[in-house]
Image (cartoon, helix red, strand yellow):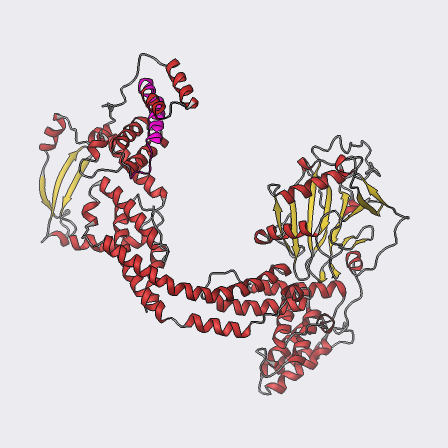
Amino acid sequence: MAMKELTFMVCFWAVCGHEFFSSTDQIAQLFEMKKDLLMSLSQCIDAKEKDVEMKSALQNLLLSYSESEDPENAVRDPVAAYKLLRRLRSELIVIIGHFHLKIPELEDLDGAASGLIRLQEIYKLYPHNITNETPLDADEAYHVGWVAYEESKFQHAFLWFLYSLNKLTKSSMTTEKELLYYLNSSAYLFGSLPQIYFDQQLPNLDPNSDEVKAQLNRLLQFLRTSNPEIFTLSTESSNYETLCKGETSQRQRALSCRYSTGGGNPRLMYAPVKEEVEWDKPQIIRYHDIISDREIEILKNISRPLLFRSETSEGVSKIRTSQCVFLEEDNPVVSRVSQRIADITGLSKESAEDLQIQNYGIGGRYEPHYDAWDDENERIATFLIYMSDVEKGGATVFPKVGVVLKPKKGSAVFWYNLHKNGNVDLFTEHAGCPVFRGSKWVANKWILEFGQEFRRPCSLSYWGRLSNSPVLFLLSPDQIAQLVEKKKDLLKGFGEYIDAEEKNIETMKSVYLYLLLLNSVPVDPEKILRDPVAAYKLLRQQRNEFINILKHIRPKIPKPEDLDGAASGLIRLQEIYKLYPKDITNEISLSADEAYHVGEVAYNENKFQHAFLWFWYSLNTLTEYSTITEEELLRSLISSAYYFGNLHLAIYFNKQLLNLDPTNDEVRAQLNRLIRSQRTSNPDIFILSTESSDYETLCRGEIDERTIKRQSALTCRYSTGGGNPRLMYAPVKEEVEWDDPQIIRYHDIISDREIEFLKNISRPQVNI
């Protein structure tokens, strides 16, 4: 019960308002909130000592955990990866009850199933083919079929529902009735009416169903002789699909292999790269062994926590299922790889996009597309590095010319997207085939047009071409593997966490006793908040005490912006009421650090006179316990005096600063500059201006004699609101405060009880 109360109380304050300085009542409520937190903290300690649920959950998870499980190997098989993802989601839902952790969403499972279906379409696979190594149970197969059905791929949906029907057991959550319904529906929508066989099975399950009988009669009436064969997949394929299956065209001519220095680049003279011409028009070149295994692992490791869903020009799309991140060159490995690309291609890396790292998901692909689209400063060339081998699938293909480039770890392929005249080379349309077995990692660098004018000169010919000179599934497989590792770490950390919690309870007790001791003296926050300086000090105190409590509980606490706002309020009071720091701190004094903070806020608001006076106040209250130093205060005094226009005082305090460190040449040079700028007229920084607007004058209560006489001539009376029946026996006290415009004050129209009621119902909803 104590834990529930604590949770409710923290949630309540999390929505109660994000700012405190703009409402003194919110500051008062902080005090009450702290009192409630102390009480709940005590209850929380007792509850945690009795909590055995966490230990029980740990034991259950340890029983299901296998140390020999190899996630890297599991995700090479898309069906195994799909099963692993489903299991991880179930197990992590248990763990998330005690740890805040991102887990696979239902959309991830749908995306994984969609990837399996796309693999079937490309590689012409039946369910029994794709599950050859890793079978699915009835519920898993039903889910894949349901996703295919939702995507209007009714033939694949039918085949998966049939597979599920054959796998059905007593422990399956999917029922035979559901499967027969979807088999019938998917067959009908595919156009295969002879599959009324499945509709005839439904009456056997429920002979009394009139709806099923009527549906069967309708299907019999529509029965026709021509029906597409639902059990046989079509063999028709696009060029893209044909190439992905490995059915390649022959090369246009005998191509070559050689060592290249990138046109005589000094960095490659003693370590030339292995260059292989993969195709001649468009020219596609593969470079072998251009990145080491160690560099690949470093790039993977710095990319993993940053990966996000890859997008196309239309945003997130099913035509591109991978995750990516762009890495800047502040990492030495990224910088080295980018420089290597520039050396090999002879193109400037200064005019290029950041290095993009990608990891493809189950059936991960990027369907046919161009890297360039005739935009200004277009992608002139693409340099694609393969960071992993792929057992099956995952090739880069060029459908218009019949090129298939298989991933080879450590190699890279390069091609120009633009002709020399700047037009897009239409033969460079390319695609990333779905990954069937393995995990595909790539890095690519898109090099832009601008800055390449002298490295690849333009051609005026419309047909000008490049010269012969070398120049989701929403979680990726690697992230599934990372989830397994994360679960392993969590299980290990779970036991350590329980031990740490037991020690933490003792710490919480000591914090609780310490805070009780601090708050043993009775405090009336409502009374304190009548004084703005006291309110400012209370806000600072509350913030410091809340930071202690926050080590165990996480409500909203005053932010630095709240302290700045409170200090800004003090400065505005000084401006309107013409108050010096000694006046406004007459009842409640500020420490040197507190006064410095107020001065700093005034300085940032360009109110240099008030800033100077607060820095001066701080200097005079400086002690050995202050965190602010004399040097910082002297620098602030110099700066605020200078900007106010009083060079005489700026010079004086600069000399004081030089006395602290006579060897400081910077301070001495600043002093000389101030002396050269010295003038005879210096406004007095210690005297506040007496000029005021009408608003400020009236706020101070300065009213002239004519106003006083005019007000004294006005009337007071009891009023019934023009004869209102509700006021006949309880008239209100009415006082005319002004005649033109007429301003009337009504006395005693709301009781103290009503006021408190309105405050209480307003507090949880107060906002800026």
In the shown orientation, is residue 38 left or right of residue 171?
left
Q: Examine the rendered structure and indicate whether residue 471 appears above or below residue 71.
A: above
Residue 537 in which image quadrant: top left
As drawn, the residue found furthest toward the front would be 663
Q: Examine the rendered structure and indicate whether residue 206 appears above or below residue 163.
A: below
Residue 119 in which image quadrant: bottom right
The residue stretch that appears in magenta: 625-651
- Asked whether 691 falls inside the magenta stretch, the response is no
Q: Where is residue 245 in the image (x, y as percent from the top left)?
A: 79, 61
In the shown orientation, is residue 717 left or right of residue 13?
left
Q: Can residue 354 be seen in this view?
A: no
In the shown orientation, is residue 365 left or right of residue 672?
right
Q: Is residue 347 visible?
A: yes
Could you say which is closer to the camera, residue 329 or residue 532? 329
The quarter in which the C terminus is drawn is top left
Q: Position of residue 339 (x, y in %)?
A: 69, 39
Could you say which is closer to the camera, residue 441 or residue 430? 441
